[in-house]
Amino acid sequence: MKRMIVVGLLLTSFGCTLSSTKPAPLPKDDFLVIAHRGASAYAPEHTLAAYDMAVQMGADYIELDIQLTKDGKLVTFHDDSVSLHNRDWPVATITFDELQLYSPGEEFNEDNPHYASVAYEELRVIGLDEVLQYFGSTINYYIEIKSPDAYPGIEAKLLHKLQAHGLLDTASDMPKVIIQSFDGDSLKKVFDREPTIPLIQLFAFDKGESLSKKALRELTTYASGIGVEAKVVTKKFVTSMHKAGLDVHPFTINDEKTMRTLMAHGIDGLFTDRPDIAVQLRNEISRASH
Ligand code: G3P
Ligand code: CA
């Protein structure tokens, strides 16, 4: 017994734990096109219209930012707060019904006259439930836990929802669900409960910034990959992440030239508002290599 304690202490002091659970694998040979907030260049973000369009365009994943309303409903919505009655309201302080006063379609039409549609004005913020009910297991979900500090218990609630929709025990080449967050503690909570879900740690690095060896070691105890802004991605960066066993999914790339450059650097997937461009490019590159 004494000997086991000594071995445990030694391993811990070298940064190892006795846990043998490894982060879930990501697809080895598939380049992932992740539709950022849906096909959000062409339709109002985080609406069924944008998600549907992304699926039609052949995206591998739709990306969803999730938050919790005051009355405990998981919603797919990016901004921390919403402007209603000339005031900004944090999502956590308003109910789902109150959030319905916001029109993502009106904002989209104003910002994107080229893609505007009167039909978009009818669209409202939707719950994660509605999305999962609508698509079920026909598509793959890349979910971001936003500001988890504002929503204690959001991880358990999310996992419960995914389980209820039968998305956690499916066997397929591509994971049905990938979860991402800028908050490592939140990801660790998911890992402790459901290590079969691949986790992506997001970072807001400046150009040239990367992770220390110690931080990398810690990260690889729970994460399968990292998400960083496109500007920090170099060949050297990608190689060092791959060496550590981490996939690299940069965000958010909407022009073909940058997509080509980063693909040549060896990235494993990318977030884009224009999944049609990324799918076309991915297919072109794949055809050329066969
Ligand atoms: O998940 C990658 C990217 O979506 C993170 O940034 O602000 O678009 O959620 P944001
Ligand atoms: Ca996001």
Image (tube, rainbow, N blue to C red):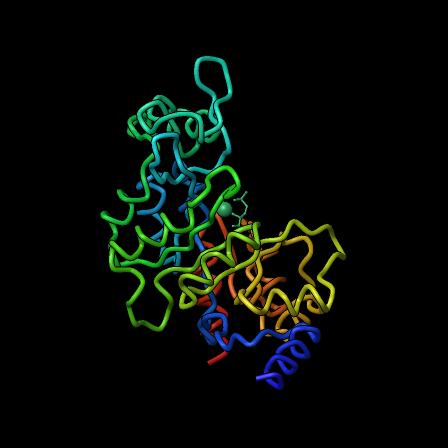
Instruction: Residue lying at the far top in this picture: please name it.
Output: 85
In the picture shown, does residue 86 fall above or below 240? above
For the point 36% across and 54% down, which residue is it?
A: 159
Judging depth in this view, the residue of 80 and 6 nearest the camera is 6
Q: Position of residue 41 (x, y in %)?
A: 45, 41
Instruction: Residue lying at the far front in this picture: please name it.
Output: 2
In the picture shown, does residue 97 fall above or below 52? above
Q: Which picture quadrant has residue 2? A: bottom right
Q: Position of residue 16 (x, y in %)?
A: 63, 75
Judging depth in this view, the residue of 63 and 38 nearest the camera is 63
274 sits to left or right of 169? right
232 sits to left or right of 253? right
In the picture shown, does residue 206 fall above or below 120? below
Q: Position of residue 138 (x, y in %)?
A: 26, 59
Quadrant including the N terminus: bottom right
Q: Position of residue 5 (x, y in %)?
A: 61, 79
87 sits to left or right of 262? left
Judging depth in this view, the residue of 49 and 131 nearest the camera is 131
All told, the count of numbered labels is 0
In the picture shown, does residue 256 fall above or below 198? above
For the point 46% across and 73% down, which residue is it?
A: 25
For the point 49% across and 43% down, which residue is it?
A: 146
